[in-house]
Image (cartoon, rainbow, N blue to C red):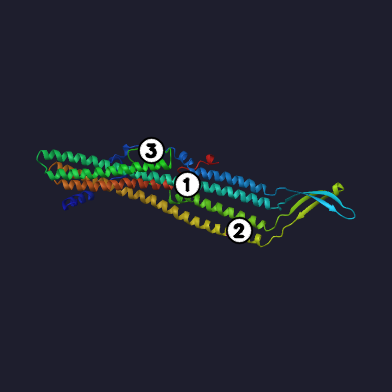
Amino acid sequence: MMMNTRFKRFALALLMQGTFVISPLALAQSSGLAEFAEPTLPANAVAVLSQTPAYQAALQGIAAERSVHRQLRTGAQEWTGTLSTAQRTQTRPTREQTSEWELLLERNLRLAGKADAYDRVGSSRVEQARALRHKVWREQARLLLDSQGGWLRAQESARVWALQVALLSRQVEAVSKRQKLGDAARIEQQLAEAALAQAQAQAQAADSRAGAARESLALHFPGLLLAAMQQLPPPQALPDSDAQWLALQEDHSPELDLARSDSAAAQAQMRLESAETRPDPRVGVRIGRAVSGAENVVGVVFSMPFGGEHRSAAAAAAVSRAEATVLRQADAQRRSQADATQRLREARTAYTFWLGNADAAQRLAQAADGLQRGYQLGEGSLSDVLSARRLANEQQLAAALGAVDAWQSRHRLELESRLLWAEPDQLAE
């Protein structure tokens, strides 16, 4: 139903009146927001995040790399035993058979400096696994925050439509009374009932979406305890300066930490491949007996491989990979700075956007209340009242969803600054 010209002029006049300009605190109190409990994020979020399969897999990855570190530190230089036996036949001057055997024990010797290089590679791989664990934790926390945000949006939408149903139900009752007194036409009763039916359908759909969002949260994060609340309180402006928020985000960026650890691991591998261009010698002890015990043999075996193109190519590849990780780290730093700036701007913009929507929502609600009172006194038309209610409801919905966005953007900023749901290091280790 389109608003007529008279309603447009009346609503515009109310919106332009200076008496309706109020502070955010007064807005919160007058709209009833202060009566509701402060919303809290799930109290057991950290415990739930620590039990996600992705995070548990990351922990197993650290355990695996620690074993690899121990393996690299120990080295593959193991003793190799070789036993050979033979029968020797001599035909001149007389035919004679003798038995002989030989035992060879040998192993590679790690050249000086290689043990330290292998140890550094193992340590860097453990640090890589830890950086990946931090990244997985942050990714799971982001998913939880986004999923809860979807649930909050559905909840707020259902709440606003429930309020609209309540208002229109009272409107239907008021029109019904006027019709019985002969002050309202049958068409007005039908218009009021149609508006109520439309709001009820929207409320049912919103309830369904909220239930689906809650079920999705329960499936992705079993055992999550969602806060029981009737309505979000008004968001708060971000404290501190932009520089502090940007520095916190960059200091705790898991993507940047992973890029740094990848670069460190590549540098360690490059040094190892450079050391491996010098092959390790192989030494051994040889003992044996021949001529059926008449001869005993004791000796030392020494062999030295010659490094070739295979080893030099491996070293060159390691240099290229190390240079690539340095470039990827620089790219990760740029993206981290850009993302941090964008998150901060989104948080401040979302708060400002909510503030404007909340102010407009209250003005339109008061305008609709004024038209309702005028209609009860016999002034104006029902179509003006219903149009005003519809416009006020749309603005209330925009303000409610804007509040969710403001809270979500703030929590996202706190999460990326490691001020929210920080990974428990003692649990991880």
Q: Residue at x 61, y 47 (%)?
A: 68
Q: Residue at x 31, y 37 (%)?
A: 35
Upstream in the sequence, badge 2 or badge 3?
Answer: 3
**Can residue 19 be spotted in the picture?**
no
Left/right placement of residue 271 relative to residue 9 reads: right
Q: Which mark is residue 227?
A: 3
Amino acid type, callout 2: Ala
- Label 1 vs label 3: CA separation? 21 Å
List the residue tagged with mark 2: 318
- Label 2 vs label 3: CA separation? 52 Å
Q: Which residues are magenta?
A: 314-320
State whether residue 329 is above or below residue 174.
below
Amino acid type, callout 1: Arg
Amino acid type, callout 3: Ala
Residue 16, position in %: x, y?
Answer: 23, 51
Left/right placement of residue 256 relative to residue 355 reads: right
Upstream in the sequence, badge 1 or badge 3?
Answer: 1
From the viewer's perspective, is the residue at label 2 or at label 3 nearer?
Answer: 2
List the residue tagged with mark 1: 138
Q: Main secondary structure of the magenta part?
A: helix
Left/right placement of residue 94 relative to residue 105 reads: right
Magenta span includes 318: yes
The one nearer the camera, 359 or 133, is 133
From the viewer's perspective, is the residue at label 1 or at label 2 nearer?
Answer: 2
